[in-house]
């Protein structure tokens, strides 16, 4: 079961990397480009792997802080909502990309510093 947890953490960290990469991909595409679907896929990966990690906690002998997990989930829901609302807009607002990246970095900070 430890391998399953490590595999989920591995995918969770790749999802984080993908979301950070999306910031640079989006910036490179220019201010007039529509929102890249990678934001949606990265958010979905974070939610799926995060929920699986929490769901399997009794089997993997983990005791996660539920308030911390709740706050991380709220931040992710905010990211996913901003992405969903703006995905089909031909030209998203200029604040959107830095705001999404800021929320991703906020969740990394919560993951690491909330002990
Ligand atoms: C943008 C969204 C997210 C980012 C960037 C993110 C980032 C991270 C990072 C960097 C870690 C490793 C921390 C460490 O080992 O010290 C981590 C661990 C974890 N995350 Fe997330 N996370 C996100 C969303 C979520 C969500 C929504 C959940 C739950 C529903 C979640 C559940 C967990 C759990 C349970 C761990 C601990 C895994 C373990 O070590 O066993 N994460 N996250």
Image (spheres, grey):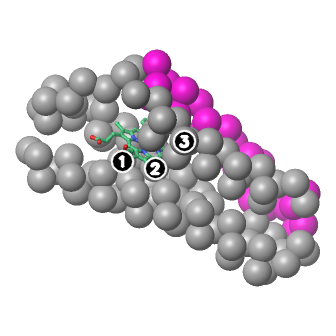
SS label for mark 3 = helix
Say whether mark 2 is within 8 Å of ligand 1. yes
Q: Are marks 1 and 2 in contact (CB under 8 Å)?
A: yes
Taking the image as shown, residue 110 lies to the left or right of residue 2, namely: right
Q: Could you classify mark 3 by the number of other residues whose Cα lies within 10 Å: few (under 14), some (14-19), or many (20 or more)?
A: few
Magenta residues span: 67-93
In this rendering, the answer to whether 21 lies above or below 48 is: below
Residue 90 placement: quadrant: bottom right
Identify the residue shown where x is 61% and y is 49%: 105
- Residue for badge 3: 109
Name the quarter where the C terminus is drawn. top left
Residue 81 lies in the magenta stretch? yes
Q: Which callout, 1 or 3, points to the residue nearer the camera?
A: 3
Q: Residues within 10 Å of mark 2 (few under 14, many from 20)?
A: many
Measured as percent of width and height from the top left, residue 20 is found at: 59, 63
Q: First in sequence: mark 2 or mark 3?
A: 2
Picture quadrant of ligand 1:
top left
Quickly name the residue at label 1: 49
Q: Is the magenta region chiefly helix, strand or loop?
A: helix
Whole-angstrom CA distance, mark 2 to mark 3, is 15 Å
Point out residue 82 in the picture as x, y percentages from the top left corner: 74, 46
Question: SS class of the residue under badge 2?
Answer: helix
x%, y% of residue 31?
89, 72
Where disc 1 sits, the SS reads helix
Pointers 2 and 3 in contact (C-beta within 8 Å): no
Q: Position of residue 40 (x, y in %)?
A: 60, 57
- Ligand 1 within 8 A of label 1's CB? yes
Measured in 3D between alpha carbons, the distance from the residue under mark 1 to the one under mark 3, in whole angstroms, is 18 Å
85 vs 103, left or right, is: right
* Mark 2 lies on residue: 46
């Amino acid at each position: 079961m430890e391998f399953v947890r490590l595999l989920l953490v591995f995918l969770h960290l790749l999802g984080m990397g993908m979301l950070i990469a999306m910031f640079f991909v989006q910036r490179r595409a220019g201010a007039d480009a529509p929102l890249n679907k990678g934001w949606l896929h990265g958010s979905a990966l974070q939610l799926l792997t995060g929920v699986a990690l929490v769901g399997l906690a009794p089997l993997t002998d983990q005791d996660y802080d539920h308030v911390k997990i709740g706050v991380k989930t709220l931040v992710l829901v905010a990211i996913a909502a901003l992405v969903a609302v703006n995905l089909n807009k031909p030209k998203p607002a200029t604040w959107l990309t830095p705001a999404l990246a800021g929320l991703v970095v906020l969740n990394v900070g919560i993951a690491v510093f909330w002990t």
